[in-house]
Image (cartoon, rainbow, N blue to C red):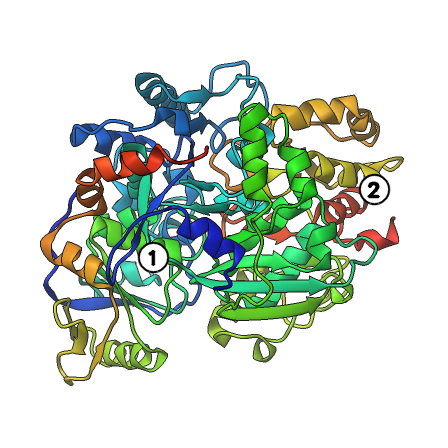
């Protein structure tokens, strides 16, 4: 499923300064039973957002009305664990278009890129600067410029550049996905397959 | 130029290289299950695409299947719906489907090798991170997301940047009571849960040479838990012996051709890795985890480390211990346990049940323990019966369940209740992994068995 183009995103951000946030926290396995890609945002961070009786855990950041926006700022090693793309769907479906962290787990990062959520990896120092800026003023806006590969804290102008390979960058800028690419090279793949020993 | 085993297999599967982008990477064999495939089939349809090579895809149901009364209809309507979707999608596209009740049904990473779907030098993917298991055969195998499942269905390819290469050598031998699970938990405790992110790991050295195929599967299975995309072990006579004659393995002339190729699959002597680590096998003791990620593990005779002595943030570490209800400096041995789970794609094979039986034989299950013994497949289940292990289990007060992922991830009915502590042979101890509010201690089948008969965390070396 191709997705919306991603060029420049300007938004406030939600801070989640916890390390090793795993995909079982992002979306617990018991919510993976859908056969359609619908409604995953409701269960994003389910067990951190809600008590077992479904009442709200007020101390959790997503339940604090002060923090909102399309950017989630997570701690080091964000998205470790399972390959469930449902984790990236939940992040997207909740309304985030970008996740910022100082380090991402591989599969989660790939899943995000495949569905149009931009993972932005910054230095540990810059991540700390972002947290402090949001803590001082939750209305702090960040600007993610994919074309320039920069992330900027708008109030202070502090800025860092981030990496993304040219292929994925073009895809996101244009809203293309890998399936668009692969279906165009069917004959080349068939030729390759015919030579495989098993 | 000298190359690694990983390079040899990877490079032979690149259909096209994209400048400053991923490789278009050919997939020999694709495993699918009920949870991560339905949306991929929907995507396929919405784009009017087709399944390009249905004979290269294999479907089995495992994640949310019940592990008792499998002959009865599945009670949970959402689970039943996913199982039905897998069955219908497989039928529509001509894909082999081993659903609930089928004689070949079982955990995808257990049945793949059992039926010779897993081969040396092959590329294997599945929408499940523990696909790394199949690397034990010298295959490149890793977990993928649902968008990628759709890519493989429609093009037999995915688009992947080539990972960096790491080699982990373990020299010497292993002590009494130390199993492949302990080797893996030891490595993860040294590297942390993100220490191998961005890498594909080759396991090398005497410990892995001497290890059985089942043990190698356990080690490769857990590669993802240190962040690695996968693990790989060079195929040898043990590997070929295991594969020979299995249902989907090459036969006759095709076997001879394959063998000629497979014998070339090893790392050249002077090949260079991006990172190389060496450990001494004799330093490893039976392991257990105390926190909420698999990197938070320690030798079972050790105490829980202080926050200052571990890598990573102090706040995150304390949050983790707070969830577990443990304190820094406490001993692991003697901790109260409520549940014991043996099974999963990590430790649900026959050798694991033999190990479990070696300790519970002649003893009795502790009264405070609820035990779930869950074979990884019907082949494992049959072997447990044929080898007389079932009698040992029954005499000791244990019951054997039917194959499935079971309590590894709490998608089915096997959930550890909130606040309860489980010693589990599975792969993840994340918060709530085995049920909301559950607390998981990851360990080997021997530690699980020792704990099951004493009711508290127990060093298996005292019972061997």
In this view, B200 is above or below B42:
below
Q: Nearer the viewer, residue B375 or A147?
A: A147
Q: Position of residue B323 (x, y in %)?
A: 53, 60
Q: Taking A6 as reference, is B394 above or below it?
A: above
Nearer the viewer's eye, disc 2 or disc 1? 1
Q: Secondary structure at mark 2?
A: helix
Asked whether the viewer can see residue B406, the reply is no
Q: Is residue B70 above or below residue A55?
A: above
| Residue at image mark 1 | B161
Marks 2 and 1 belong to one chain = yes
Q: Is residue A112 above or below residue B158?
A: below
Distance from label 2 to label 1 (Cα)?
45 Å
| Chain name for mark 2 | B
Residue highlighted by disc 2:
B359
Element at label 1: loop
Across and down, in percent, residue B7 comes to 46, 56
Residue visible at 51% across and 47% down in the picture: B132
**Residue under the image location 40 percent in, 60 percent down:** A105
- In the image: residue A66, left or right of residue A16: left
The local crowd at label 1, few if under 14, some if 14 to 19, many if 20 or more residues have their Cα within 10 Å, is some
User: Residue B97: image x %, image y %?
Assistant: 44, 21
Residue B214: image tag: none
Q: Is residue B403 left or right of residue B238?
A: left
Residue located 70% across and 49% down the image: B444
Q: Is residue B131 visible?
A: yes
- Pointer 2 or 1: first along the chain: 1
Quarter holding residue B348: top right
Query: Which chain is home to disc 1?
Result: B
Picture mark count: 2
């Amino acid at each position: 499923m191709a997705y919306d183009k991603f060029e420049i995103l300007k938004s406030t951000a939600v801070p989640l300064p916890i390390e090793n946030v795993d995909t079982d926290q992002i979306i617990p396995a018991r919510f993976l039973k859908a056969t359609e890609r619908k409604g995953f945002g409701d269960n994003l961070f389910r067990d951190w957002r809600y008590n077992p009786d479904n009442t709200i855990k007020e101390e959790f950041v997503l339940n604090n009305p002060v923090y909102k926006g399309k950017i989630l700022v997570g701690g080091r090693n964000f998205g470790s664990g399972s390959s469930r793309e449902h984790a990236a769907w939940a992040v997207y479906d909740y309304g985030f278009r970008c996740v910022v962290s100082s380090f991402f787990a591989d599969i989660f990062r790939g899943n995000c890129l495949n569905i149009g959520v931009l993972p932005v990896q910054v230095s540990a120092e810059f991540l700390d600067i972002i947290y402090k800026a949001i803590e001082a003023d939750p209305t702090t806006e960040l600007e993610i410029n994919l074309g320039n590969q920069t992330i900027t804290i708008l109030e202070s102008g502090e800025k860092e550049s981030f990496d993304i390979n040219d292929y994925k960058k073009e895809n996101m800028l244009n809203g293309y996905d890998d399936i668009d690419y692969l279906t165009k090279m069917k004959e080349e793949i068939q030729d390759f397959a015919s030579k495989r020993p098993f | 130029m000298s190359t690694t085993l990983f390079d040899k297999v990877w490079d032979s599967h690149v259909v096209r290289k994209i400048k400053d982008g991923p490789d278009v990477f050919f997939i020999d064999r694709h495993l699918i299950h009920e949870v991560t495939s339905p949306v991929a089939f929907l995507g396929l349809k919405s784009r009017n695409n087709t399944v390009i090579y249905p004979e290269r895809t294999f479907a089995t149901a495992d994640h949310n299947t019940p592990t008792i009364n499998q002959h009865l209809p599945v009670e949970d309507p959402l689970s039943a719906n996913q199982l039905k979707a897998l069955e219908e999608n497989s039928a529509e596209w001509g894909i082999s489907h081993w659903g609930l009740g089928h004689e070949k049904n079982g955990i995808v990473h257990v049945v793949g090798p059992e039926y010779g779907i897993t081969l040396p030098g092959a590329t294997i993917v599945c929408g499940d991170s523990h696909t790394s298991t199949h690397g034990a055969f010298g295959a490149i195998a890793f977990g993928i997301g649902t968008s990628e499942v759709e890519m493989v269905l429609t093009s037999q390819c995915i688009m992947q940047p080539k990972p960096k290469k790491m080699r982990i050598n373990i020299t010497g031998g292993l002590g009494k009571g130390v199993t492949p699970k302990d080797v893996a938990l030891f490595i993860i405790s040294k590297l942390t849960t993100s220490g191998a992110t961005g890498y594909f790991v080759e396991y090398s050295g005497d410990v892995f040479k001497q290890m059985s195929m089942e043990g190698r599967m356990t080690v490769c299975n857990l590669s993802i838990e240190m962040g690695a995309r996968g693990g790989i072990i060079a195929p040898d006579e043990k590997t070929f012996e295991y594969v020979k004659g299995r249902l989907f393995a090459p036969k006759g002339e095709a076997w001879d051709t394959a063998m000629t190729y497979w014998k070339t699959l090893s790392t050249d002597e002077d090949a260079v890795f991006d990172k190389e680590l060496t450990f001494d096998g004799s330093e490893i003791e039976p392991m257990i985890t105390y926190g909420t990620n698999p990197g938070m593990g320690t030798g079972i005779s050790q105490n829980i480390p202080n926050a200052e002595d571990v890598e990573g943030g102090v706040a995150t570490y304390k949050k983790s211990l707070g969830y577990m209800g443990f304190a820094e400096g406490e001993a692991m041995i003697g901790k109260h346990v409520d549940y014991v789970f043996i099974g999963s794609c990590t430790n649900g094979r026959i050798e694991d049940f033999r190990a479990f039986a070696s300790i519970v034989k002649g003893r009795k299950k502790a009264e405070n323990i609820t035990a779930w013994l869950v074979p990884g497949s019907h082949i494992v289940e049959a072997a447990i019966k044929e080898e007389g292990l079932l009698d040992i289990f029954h005499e000791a007060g244990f019951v054997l369940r039917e194959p499935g992922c079971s309590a590894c991830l709490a998608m089915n009915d096997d959930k550890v209740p909130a606040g309860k502590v489980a010693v589990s042979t599975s792969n993840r101890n994340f918060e709530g992994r085995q049920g909301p509010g559950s607390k998981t201690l990851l360990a080997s089948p021997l530690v699980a068995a020792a704990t099951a008969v004493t009711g508290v965390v127990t060093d298996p070396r005292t019972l061997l």
